[in-house]
Image (tube, rainbow, N blue to C red):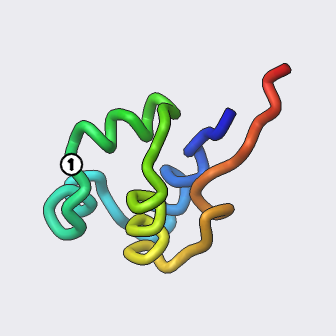
Amino acid sequence: MIIFDRLWKIMEQKGVSTYWLREKCGIDSKTIRRLRANENMETKTLDKLCKVLGCKLEDIAEFIDNE
């Protein structure tokens, strides 16, 4: 399972809010809700997040083996 707990930490460190993601980056509230729920995410969304936050994918997402 892929979780996005790291995303919220890096956003806090950089002083970025979900409002900023919605208004300045074009990430809609439905996508933010899906990120919070660790639901499936399109790679283009992950790419956009990495670009606007200036980070790598492993900085915002983590694979957890839940077997």
In this picture, is 8 found above or below 29? below
In this picture, is 11 found above or below 64? below
In this picture, is 37 found above or below 28? above
How many numbered marks appear? 1
Q: Which percent across, then down, holds residue 10?
A: 53, 62
The quadrant in which the C terminus is found is: top right
Closest to the observer, 39 or 5: 39
Identify the residue at image location x=39%, y=58%. 45
Closest to the observer, 2 or 11: 2
Identify the residue at the far left of this view.
Answer: 23
In this image, 27 relative to 52: left or right?
Answer: left
In this image, 18 relative to 64: left or right?
Answer: left
Q: Residues within 10 Å of mark 1 (few under 14, many from 20)?
A: few
In this image, 34 relative to 26: left or right?
Answer: right
Q: Which percent across, then down, holds residue 22?
A: 20, 56
In this image, 30 relative to 12: left or right?
Answer: left
Q: Which percent across, then down, holds residue 8?
A: 49, 50
Identify the residue at image location x=52%, y=33%. 38
Mark 1: which secondary structure? loop
The quadrant in which the N terminus is found is: top right
Badge 1 amino acid: Asp
What residue did someone put label 1 on?
28
Identify the residue at image location x=48%, y=32%. 39
Q: Which percent across, then down, holds residue 17?
A: 30, 57
